[in-house]
């Protein structure tokens, strides 16, 4: 069964990837990992998600969200999107391009944030992927 | 259903110097007076608010009659759930007359939400993704792309609604705007500009319901609740506050509730003369036109352009200005839709009256996290 302790962060151990889960009964893939399948209730197993995907939708956040948002004091608009990874679409912040320069269908790759003192990663970005080496 | 609406009441929507609770009380008293019944005759009540306290506490000013008063909170579907509870109490024979009431008074600006309340981890909010307007924009952006629709349709819908609210003395937004003014306004979450969103606001609304048999003895203008259907999301829908979406998406709760409502009422979307749809923002209204069955997905332009959704159009929608023109006091919003439909079917809508004696009305609410209540009403 997937370990869903909240302290271990969002990254898969030993992978430069996000930690998702796959249902052991119906094969549905989810993110973040949780112990029970939201479709059928069966136990899930941890899995590392693909590190590259295709932008499925996007928008620009042009005003400062209310707490618990913890951004820099000087608010800068940022882009949020869903990335199609094949068996699941994962929401996330996009980076590496001006905020209004995104198009559905753009290729993106994952970049994990810095780990905290306990080694857990809590942020990630989808970076514009122009086909360079991974 | 063998349930009818015999009275409606509304405290105007907008910003006021009284409490949300007082607005609920005013709306409840107005609905009772409109029905011509006393509070003592009410055998069941239901209501709710998000930010203005317990609806059931209204009894301390309406009268401590011992009436069963069910408190409900169901996000944007709160008022629809209150009406459903009343209708089912009547259908079951538990009561002959029932009151549904909703009210609210929200702080300015988009709602802030706590991830833990939705079973989500804190990082989701800390990194700036726990934002309702973002979800609406992401869903609209994808919908426009998938169906090849022009962003300008969002401006057309907004212009129609603001024209309607400019004619409605109870509405908040009383200034009509051109499509260009709406399209050129400040972008909030692309592709949605500031005027395309409803804002949290204040207001109250109430209806008095009775069994159709009792309604006939009380009122000569009762409006029949032909059907009222409530659904929650199935696996694979696209809802607010979701760090992930399924590989294969499925129809929303609105599709399920609307098709069930038309089936139970024995009529089709084509038969509807006036509709009130959930327009938390213009993209929601655009999608709901198709989800409720008024057109196919991607075929909205034919319905919307050339004033098609206007009071004199092919399908008058959100004739009181909808959420865009009234804002959203969550507890009251779905009841406002029903009040407007009843007002139109009774021919009492003044300058915004739909012509030619409309006979069939439809209402739809949709809210977080994936619930919908749809109703068919008729004279």
Image (cartoon, rainbow, N blue to C red):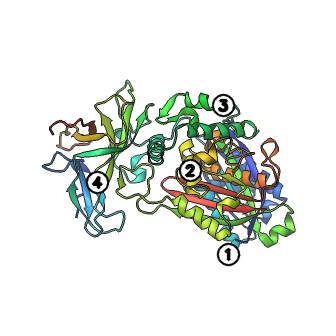
In the rendering, which numbered label is found on residue B181?
Answer: none
In the image, residue B35 lies at what x, y percent? 82, 58
In the image, residue B159 lies at what x, y percent? 64, 36
Q: Are marks 1 and 2 in contact (CB under 8 Å)?
A: no
- Looking at the image, which residue sits at the far top? A74
Q: Are marks 1 and 3 in contact (CB under 8 Å)?
A: no
Q: Residue at x 15, y 48 (%)?
A: A15
Return the disc, 1 or 3, that comes first in the chain's sequence: 1
Question: How many numbered circles are shown?
Answer: 4
The CA span between labels 4 and 1 is: 48 Å
**Above or below — where is A130 with respect to B248?**
above
| Residues flagged by tags 4 and 3 on a common chain | no
Q: Residue at x 55, y 33 (%)?
A: B194
Q: Secondary structure at mark 1?
A: loop
Q: Circle 2 sits on which residue?
A: B299
| Residues flagged by tags 1 and 2 on a common chain | yes
Looking at the image, which is closer to me, B259 or A65?
A: B259
Q: Secondary structure at mark 4?
A: loop
- Looking at the image, which residue sits at the far left? A14
Q: Is residue B67 visible?
A: no
Task: State the image quarter where residue B195 is shown.
Answer: top right
Neighbourhood count class around disc 4 (C-alpha, 10 Å): few under 14, some 14–19, many 20 upward = some
Q: Residue at x 17, y 45 (%)?
A: A16
Is B216 on the left-hand or right-hand side of B141?
A: right
Q: Circle 1 sits on which residue?
A: B92
Q: Circle 3 sits on which residue?
A: B177
């Amino acid at each position: 069964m997937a370990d869903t302790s909240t302290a271990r962060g969002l990254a898969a151990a030993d992978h430069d990837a996000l930690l998702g889960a796959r249902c052991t009964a119906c094969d549905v893939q989810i993110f973040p990992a949780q112990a029970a399948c939201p479709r059928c209730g069966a136990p899930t197993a941890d899995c590392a998600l693909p590190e590259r995907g295709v932008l499925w939708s996007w928008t620009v956040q042009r005003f400062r969200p209310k707490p618990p948002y913890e951004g820099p004091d000087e608010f800068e608009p940022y882009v949020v999107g869903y990335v199609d990874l094949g068996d699941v679409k994962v929401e996330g912040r996009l980076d590496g391009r001006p905020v209004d320069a995104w198009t559905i269908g753009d290729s993106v790759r994952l970049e994990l944030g810095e780990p905290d003192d306990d080694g857990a990663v809590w942020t990630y970005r989808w970076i514009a992927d122009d086909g360079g080496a991974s | 259903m063998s349930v009818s609406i015999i009275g409606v009441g509304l405290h105007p929507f907008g910003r006021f110097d009284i409490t949300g609770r007082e607005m609920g009380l005013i709306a409840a008293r107005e609905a009772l007076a409109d029905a011509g019944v006393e509070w003592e005759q009410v055998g069941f009540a239901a209501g709710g608010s998000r930010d203005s306290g317990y609806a059931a506490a209204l009894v301390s000013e309406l009268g401590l009659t011992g009436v069963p008063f069910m408190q409900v909170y169901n996000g944007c579907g709160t008022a629809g759930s209150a009406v459903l509870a009343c209708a089912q109490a009547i259908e079951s024979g538990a009561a002959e007359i029932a009151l549904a009431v909703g009210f609210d008074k929200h702080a300015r600006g988009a709602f802030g939400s706590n991830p833990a309340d939705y079973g989500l981890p804190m990082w989701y909010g800390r990194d700036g993704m726990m934002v309702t307007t973002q979800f609406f924009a992401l869903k609209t952006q994808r919908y426009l792309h998938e169906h090849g629709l022009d962003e300008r349709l969002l401006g057309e819908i907004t212009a129609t609604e603001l024209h309607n609210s400019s004619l409605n003395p109870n509405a908040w937004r009383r200034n009509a705007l051109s499509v260009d003014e709406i399209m050129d306004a400040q972008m909030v979450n692309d592709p949605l500009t500031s005027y395309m969103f409803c804002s949290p606001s204040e207001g109250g609304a109430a209806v008095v319901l009775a069994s159709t048999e009792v309604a006939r003895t009380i009122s000569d203008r009762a409006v029949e609740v032909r059907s009222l259907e409530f659904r929650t999301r199935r696996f694979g829908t696209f809802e607010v506050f979701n760090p992930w979406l399924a590989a294969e998406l499925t129809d929303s709760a609105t599709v399920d509730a609307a098709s069930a409502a038309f089936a139970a009422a024995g009529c089709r979307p084509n038969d509807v003369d006036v509709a009130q749809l959930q327009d938390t923002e213009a993209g929601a209204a655009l999608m709901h036109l198709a989800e409720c069955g008024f057109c196919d997905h991607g075929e909205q332009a034919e319905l919307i352009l050339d004033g098609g959704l206007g009071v004199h159009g092919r399908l008058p929608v959100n004739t009181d200005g909808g959420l865009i023109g009234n804002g959203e006091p969550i507890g009251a919003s779905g009841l406002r839709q029903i009040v407007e439909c009843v007002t139109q079917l009774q021919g009492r809508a003044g300058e915004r009256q739909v012509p030619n004696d409309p006979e069939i009305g439809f209402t739809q609410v949709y809210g977080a996290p994936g619930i919908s209540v749809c109703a068919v009403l008729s004279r």
